């Protein structure tokens, strides 16, 4: 869309405000809003200034001035504001007009640009399956003398005996019993449908929605694949709509990977493929999973670099509460066709040559999508460049249920890091595949690791309520 078309859109739709947005290191959106009367063609040349020192992990106070540069291809009318508002996603530049090396969106764009220089293909497609919970109440506290959290849901399995207004009518979702039941067990059909309606209204192509495995309102909505940066934009829009629709219904949505103990967590399985023009590069009929040698090398790169990747695809301490055996968590660094216990799955049901793809099941939605998708692409491209054979490297294929293997066989399978600190150690030891391309800089990696180390330390030094159960009587 041209600048003029955006300006025409503002006029034709009686837009009163224009909201300029950018994404921080953690993957959270921020915004500054201008009256539409203050937006003209020069705004798209000069950008919108903001204070980078107030954004964690961005700039020091001595060099705080930064500029949002609007992207006219990432525009939508906000469905939640009382006053007609046009939202525009932006890249971050320094005051001298250079792309800011810590801007996650610019990193995603550089990854796409790098792909085109390799001769491997022209376009990488991504499709995330981002799961979330919808709760009726959430409370939490972490202070000097108190630490607690509490969530509740009208459909939760623990509420079968709760007193409710009008009486308890039963039909709660059992633990691990929430996969695609119909109403009245599934009590969130309408709220998910409203989320889908709003997603379609702002331009997302939604393919389906359903209740997920866990009790207490776990859900999934799938939208159509797109190019790397566009898919990251779409995921930010998806999360914005999920959060705000839940709010309108008097509920709260969270993409936290493991908000409940003892039931499945929320992942973000990511489907990936590479095309050269209109030609799919991952398909070879009759091969294992109908995957080409190039696709197998891509898998080799993803699995070889997985411990380092996980620092970017699972970047929270809570991520590793999900990545434990027994809750359908993809902790095994192997590949397989159709097998959901492997970290890399090759979908084989109703797949056409253009639909041929791989699925990395380990990530979760605490990941910054721009960094997450860029890093996965670079890992796969490094596998192609180095011809990493996942079979020769011992990554499979494993076509059995890995969770049920004898312990001796399990010992031979490499697992994901067990903590955020371990993943950050792996990233520090194996970051060349990210930095040698010029997509990520060494300074970015060092800053990212420092920010995440501080998060891990903040959690590690705090007293956990369960420690009182274990040790108070000592």
Image (cartoon, rainbow, N blue to C red):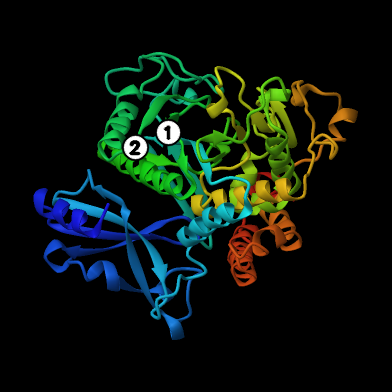
- Residue 28, placed above or below residue 171: below
Q: Which mark is residue 45?
A: none
Pick the residue in front: 456 or 144. 456
Residue 278 falls left or right of residue 167: right
Which quarter of the picture shows residue 297?
Answer: top right
Residue 111 falls left or right of residue 291: left
* For marks 2 and 1 on the same chain, the one whose residue lies earlier in the sequence: 2
- Residue 445, placed above or below residue 319: below
Measured in 3D between alpha carbons, the distance from the residue under mark 2 to the one under mark 1, in whole angstroms, is 7 Å
Q: Are marks 2 and 1 in contact (CB under 8 Å)?
A: yes
- Residue 14, placed above or below residue 254: below
Q: Which mark is residue 204?
A: 2
Q: Position of residue 184 (x, y in %)?
A: 36, 14
Q: Position of residue 155 (x, y in %)?
A: 41, 24
Disc 2, SS:
loop
Which quarter of the picture shows residue 358?
Answer: top right
Q: Position of residue 182 (x, y in %)?
A: 40, 13
Q: Position of residue 15 (x, y in %)?
A: 13, 53
Q: Can see residue 316? A: no
Q: Residue at x 38, y 27 (%)?
A: 154
Q: Residue at x 65, y 22 (%)?
A: 338
Q: Can see residue 386? A: yes
Q: Residue at x 13, y 52 (%)?
A: 83
Disc 1, SS:
loop
Residue ID for mark 1: 224
Residue 47 falls left or right of residue 11: right
Pick the residue in front: 468 or 105. 105
């Amino acid at each position: 869309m041209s600048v003029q078309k955006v300006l025409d859109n503002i006029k034709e739709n009686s837009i009163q405000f224009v909201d300029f947005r950018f994404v921080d290191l953690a993957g959270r959106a921020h915004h500054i809003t201008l009256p539409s009367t203050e937006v003209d063609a020069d705004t798209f040349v000069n950008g919108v200034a903001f204070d980078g020192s107030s954004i964690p992990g961005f700039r020091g106070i001595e060099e705080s001035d930064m500029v949002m540069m609007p992207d006219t291809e990432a525009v939508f009318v906000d469905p939640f504001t009382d006053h007609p508002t046009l939202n525009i996603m932006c890249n971050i530049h320094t005051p001298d007009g250079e792309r800011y090396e810590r801007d996650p969106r610019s990193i995603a764009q550089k990854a796409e640009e790098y792909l085109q220089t390799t001769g491997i293909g022209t376009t990488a497609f991504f499709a995330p399956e981002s799961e979330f919970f919808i709760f009726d109440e959430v409370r939490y506290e972490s202070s000097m003398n108190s630490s607690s959290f509490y969530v509740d849901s009208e459909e939760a399995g623990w509420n079968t005996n709760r007193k409710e207004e009008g009486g308890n009518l039963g039909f709660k979702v059992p633990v691990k019993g929430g996969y695609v039941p119909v109403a009245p067990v599934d009590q969130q059909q309408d709220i998910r449908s409203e989320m889908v309606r709003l997603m379609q209204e702002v331009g997302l192509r939604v393919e389906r929605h359903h209740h997920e495995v866990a009790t207490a309102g776990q859900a999934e909505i799938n939208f159509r694949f797109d190019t790397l940066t566009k898919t990251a934009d779409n995921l930010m829009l998806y999360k914005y709509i999920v959060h705000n629709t839940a709010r309108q219904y008097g509920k709260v949505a969270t993409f936290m990977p493991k908000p409940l103990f003892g039931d499945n967590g929320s992942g973000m399985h990511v489907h990936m493929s590479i095309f050269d023009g209109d030609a799919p590069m991952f398909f070879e009929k009759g091969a294992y999973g109908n995957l080409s040698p190039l696709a197998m090398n891509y898998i080799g790169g993803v699995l070889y670099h997985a411990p380092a990747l996980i620092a970017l695809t699972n970047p929270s301490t809570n991520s590793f509460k999900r990545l434990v055996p027994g809750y359908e968590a993809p902790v095994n660094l192997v590949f397989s066709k159709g097998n959901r216990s492997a970290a890399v799955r090759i979908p084989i049901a109703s797949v056409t040559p253009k639909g041929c793809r791989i699925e990395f099941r380990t990530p979760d939605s605490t990941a910054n999508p721009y960094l997450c998708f860029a890093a996965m692409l670079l890992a796969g491209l490094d596998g192609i460049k180095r011809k990493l054979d996942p079979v020769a490297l011992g990554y499979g294929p494993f076509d059995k249920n890995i969770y049920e293997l004898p312990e001796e066989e399990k010992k031979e399978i490499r697992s994901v890091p067990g903590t955020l600190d371990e993943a950050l150690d792996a990233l520090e030891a194996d970051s060349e595949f990210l930095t040698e391309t010029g997509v990520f800089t060494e300074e970015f990696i060092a800053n990212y690791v420092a920010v995440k180390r501080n998060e891990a330390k903040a959690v590690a030094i705090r007293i956990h309520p369960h420690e009182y159960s274990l040790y108070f009587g000592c």
